[in-house]
Amino acid sequence: MIMRFIYKLGSPPYFYHLSSRLLPWLSGICLLLFAIGLYGGLVLAPADYQQGDSFRIIYIHVPAAWLSLFVYMVMAASGVMALIWRIKIAEIVLINSAHIGAVFTFLALVTGSIWGKPMWGTWWVWDARLTSELLLLFLYLGIIALHSAIDDKRKAARAVAILAIVGVVNIPIIHYSVEWWSTLHQGPTVTKFDKPSIDTRMLVPLLVMAVAYKFLYAIVVLLRARNDLLWRERRSQWVASLFTDTKSK
Amino acid sequence: MDTFQQFFHMGGYAAYVWSSYAIALVAFIWSIVSPLREKNKLAKRIQGIIENENP
Amino acid sequence: MLQAFFIILQRDLILAIRHRAELMNPVLFFVLVVVLFPLGVGADIAILERIAPGIIWIAALLSALLSLDRIFRTDMEDGSLEQMLISAQPMSLLILAKIIAHWLITGLPVVVVGPLLALFLGLPAAAIETLLITLLVGTPILSAIGSVGVALTVGLRRGGVILSLLVLPLYVPVLIFASQAVDAAAAGFPVLAPVAMLSALLLLSLSLTPWAASAALKMSVS
């Protein structure tokens, strides 16, 4: 049943018109979630005992880090579908997720660095989390670079699918090795990012923000995917009717 | 008004907190605006193609 | 099927020996990179000794990277890659043969020369043996993972730069486990954990990368 839906999505006009109907809803929900999350995080949550108000960076940093991994998983899953079942919509989701995934990763890095300054006095700390994120950024950039280097975009999609799958196998390995590496030379500063016993009033906005980010991801992917489809199908009837309709209005 | 002051002050960490949120905002807005602008450009190009092929 | 494996292995080795002069290049590059470090960092033996495992291993990574091209490029240019692809033999098996050949040609010399260089960097004798083991176990991993990168980029004009971008992040676990194992040995700590991880990575990479490289080649060559 899900496969049938996915196959239906494979029809470009169906995907395009479905996404046209969904986007307003997704946008509304996304804005609402951000509003709730930001209010909860910036206003309702009490200041942290040790970090004061600077901990509020968590509401940008942590969801960005979570999403950077989530998007990669989605890309890898799309890669599998694209390679094994040749589902075109999977190819499109894969390629159009890379940029926003890289943005999330970059955001996690920058906000992690900014957060580090008041906490540890330096702009960068080679701790497990940040170093892993940095390597993840390179994985994303590799995918973007490879895709743009291959002229034949159908070939490029296959190449990137393989790379995404290879990457996803490596992510746990990289993460574990970096984790292990950082414990060997643990300085006197303990990473404040992991395992705090977190107050519910702090946790709930965090979860809300994570969902908000997911909706943002969905919106961005849909926007990009639609452009991709329009261009690929530019000579087709359904695209023509889109533009002649608006002309006659 | 005092609470607004306190809010913006963020316990002394204002620069760090607000710059993080600002960067996120810029990144998100760019991520949405960029495909929208691309769509406009695409629309013009596709219009052109359609007109060329259906005079 | 096994015969095809050995034929390809033998072929690659013979081709390499025919261009004997080229054989030295990866090793020379390896030595050169190692030599750059004292020049750049200062000849304080206390510092060099401390970072020696990292130096050796980073140099090994870079020299592997530089030599990866040879796995598929000449075969692609003269058409033998296509022949392999359309032959009845499973491509992943042939690729495994090429990976092993590549390691014998470019990795094994590094395994031999590395520990010698480490002596010049002041690495204590206790750690040299561990260095040898990590190089022996780790350099084939570099060839294996690298083969996937080359398979993806062999058809591209300036594939070399992208190759580095793709492959180096994947090399990081090898670098970490190998250099930390040697560090541990130098400090007198047990090395079983990182060496075991390296061995696991070796088995994993040898079994999985040929499939990935095969899929990538079919894409590159089509």
Image (cartoon, rainbow, N blue to C red):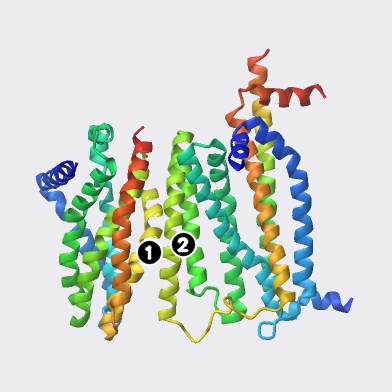
Subunit under mark 2: A
Measured as percent of width and height from the top left, residue A140 is found at 50, 53
The residue where tag 1 is placed is C172
Quarter of the view holding residue B36: top right
In the rendered image, the vertical position of residue A67 relative to residue A241, given as above or below: below
Q: Are marks 1 and 2 in contact (CB under 8 Å)?
A: yes
Query: What mark, if any, has residue A135 been given in the picture?
Result: 2
Write the residue at 40% across / 80% down.
Answer: A184
Q: Quadrant of the N terminus of chain A?
A: top right
Measured as percent of width and height from the top left, residue A46 is found at 76, 79
Q: Please state if A204 lies on the left or on the right of C5 as rendered.
A: right
Measured as percent of width and height from the top left, residue A125 is found at 51, 75
Measured as percent of width and height from the top left, residue A107 is found at 60, 62
Write the residue at 67% across / 76% down.
Answer: A55
In the rendered image, the vertical position of residue C108 relative to residue A77, given as above or below: below
Q: Amino acid at mark 2?
A: Leu
Q: Please state if C178 lies on the left or on the right of C103 as rendered.
A: right
Is residue C168 at least partly visible in the picture? yes
